[in-house]
Amino acid sequence: MKKIFLTLSLLMAGVMAFAGNWAPAGDLIKTRWAAQVDPKNPLPEYPRPQMVRTDWQSLNGLWKYAILPKNDNYNKADGEILVPFCVESSLSGVQKRVGKDNALWYERTFTVPANWRKNKVLLHFGAVDWSAEIWVNGIKVGSHTGGYTPFSLDITSALRKSGRQTLTVKVLDATDNSYQPRGKQVEANYGIWYTPVTGIWQTVWLEPVPAKASIVSYYPVWNAEKKELSVSVQADGDYDAVAVRLLDSKTIVGEGQVIAVAEPKLWSPDSPNLYDLDIELLKNGKVVDQVKGYTALRSIAKIREGRTKDRRTTNFTRMYLNGEPLFQFGPLDQGWWPDGLYTAPTDEALVYDIVKTKEWGWNMIRKHIKIEPARWYYWCDKLGVLVWQDMPCIGDHGVRGDKNSLDTRDPEIRENTHNKWAHDSFLGGTDCNIPQEWQDNYYKEWGEIIDAFKSFQCIVVWVPFNEAWGQFDTPRAVKFTREKDPTRLVNESSGGNFTLSGDIQDVHHYAAPAMRAVEKELVNVIGEYGGLGWPIEGHLWQKDKNWGYGTVFNNGEELLEVYADFAELLKEYIRLMGCGGAVYTQTTDVEIEVNGIMTYDREIIKVDEKRFAEINKAVINALK
């Protein structure tokens, strides 16, 4: 008992040592959840719900930080920063810019529990934007590039036998003055382009794993025709067998890496059934490592329709979920927060937007040129929301020549990301002049994103490009995406330059939805429309220059009436033009955009929710 108490005391001492003075920085609007952030233990939930081990230690909390010229070494802290909130955010307690010529340094100490000593100790980062170098006790343990994917480092050999361990991280982030994928981030933010996100923005944590063999990941694939679930397991070390069990409410359905399921409970937005997975590594019949996970059984396909039951010939290609046609309808969801920027203040906040999406009658979310933490996809799996997942863009051709956004960029960056966008047309579009180094990095990061998140069954569509921003060699990008994951549909370029190489033809049209480019061999969707704005005083990022894509309204009744008119258009497109899905801009206001159904602080829902849900459900049911 004394040994357990001593271990807990050391852990608490490590936490308390970093529980200094902290408060959100700045005076911009915040969400209600900002007041619930505990600087001693922010975002305490287990960060990887698909592969759970019972023993772990969060390193979230107050760290030391410094912003220095990028070639200088760290020697003295500027102050404290709350991890995992990026340095530009209010919740970091700092709210400072870094820029391409500087480096952001982090440092903290931690202790390793005594009962971990026989294990290998892994250091996990949920995401660090963009380039990170990591040292433990002055020993470099690894590096990583890519602002959206988790990575892990084996730090066992760098650990001292006992006592405090020192963790140091150096981050470089050139944002839009580079070839790196960065989504809506720009150094000179305005309009639809937002504040940079630099540094650690997802949970940092430690985990002990068996020294001789450990599970790294798994990938479940449901074969609807054979009624079989295949589970491939990646593992390291010395083992001779893998055991997999599929469970339904603690009842074993089947065992093995290929499991027959005679009476599958299929996952859908109306019935989001999840199965548990127990995965073990064995050596000479003994378990050497085990994790608990989950999966869902569902299929997604595009199908060219022929004659229907009412003998009406449609001749359209539509998306089929579990063998049934389904109109996929939901919001453009950018995943930004006024207080945490890329990072939701709490897990309750993270799930809130998903819950509201379901309550409002939608069945899908287009996650717009941002990747979320694993827990976000877990909640979509659990609540039953389909996801179209975008790749964060590497360019934004549409602002070429705009002094507000390009003054901070090098001439090479401007030139190589400039192209022509064939808006709503098959003609006139051109590729960006992307150098080979940029292309290689694009595929590296996109491949890592697919590998990291393809086990979440809520994702049904991958989107390599958006609106021709940084778009290049699209057929190759589609081929790459299909090879990485042949189980999903590929939307080659949402609203971008069309090559007809994907599964989906996606047009954008503001404010009213329209379909000006249709291809019957592909699923035709409206990937963005709407953008109806209503700036609500007291809930704005800034007081002036707020805007929406369409008419800016003064009340929710007028906004909802126009939204309802747009819904009637969608019904006609479903019936007459084979429209298979639509995306409304957007879930919330973001910075100076006031296009949201909710305000940026999530305090005001701008429309009558019951009527709104009725309209959305009627659109989805128009295909039935």
Image (spheres, grey):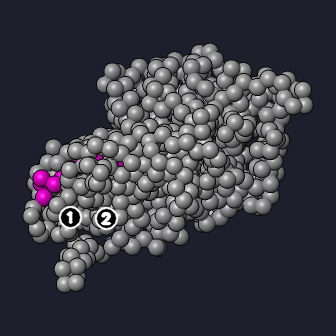
Q: Residue at x 69, y 43 (%)?
A: 329
Q: Which mark is residue 97?
A: none
Amino acid type at image mark 2: Asp
Q: Is residue 163 left or right of residue 559?
A: left
Amino acid type at image mark 1: Trp
Q: Is residue 350 visible?
A: yes
Q: Position of residue 141 (x, y in %)?
A: 17, 48
Q: Quadrant of the C terminus?
A: top right
1 or 2: tag closer to the N-terminus? 2
At label 1, counting other C-alpha atoms closer than 10 Å, the crowd grade (few under 14, some 14-19, many 20 or more) is: some
Q: Is residue 573 left or right of residue 452?
A: right
Q: Is residue 408 visible?
A: no
Viewer-proximal residue, 159 or 224?
224
Q: Which residues are magenta?
A: 147-159
CB contact under 8 Å: marks 1 and 2: yes
Q: Is residue 148 magenta?
A: yes
Q: Quadrant of the N terminus?
A: bottom left
Q: Which mark is residue 55?
A: 2
Q: Is residue 599 above or below residue 517?
A: below
Q: Which mark is residue 116?
A: 1
Q: Position of residue 402 (x, y in %)?
A: 48, 33
Q: Is residue 120 left or right of residue 148?
A: left
Query: Residue 549 falls in which quadrant of the image?
Result: top right
Q: Is residue 361 left or right of residue 444?
A: right
As helix, strand or loop, the secondary structure at mark 1 comes to: helix
Q: How many marks?
A: 2
Q: Is residue 289 above or below residue 312?
A: below
As helix, strand or loop, the secondary structure at mark 2 comes to: loop
Q: Residue at x 12, y 69 (%)?
A: 163
Q: Position of residue 100 (x, y in %)?
A: 29, 42
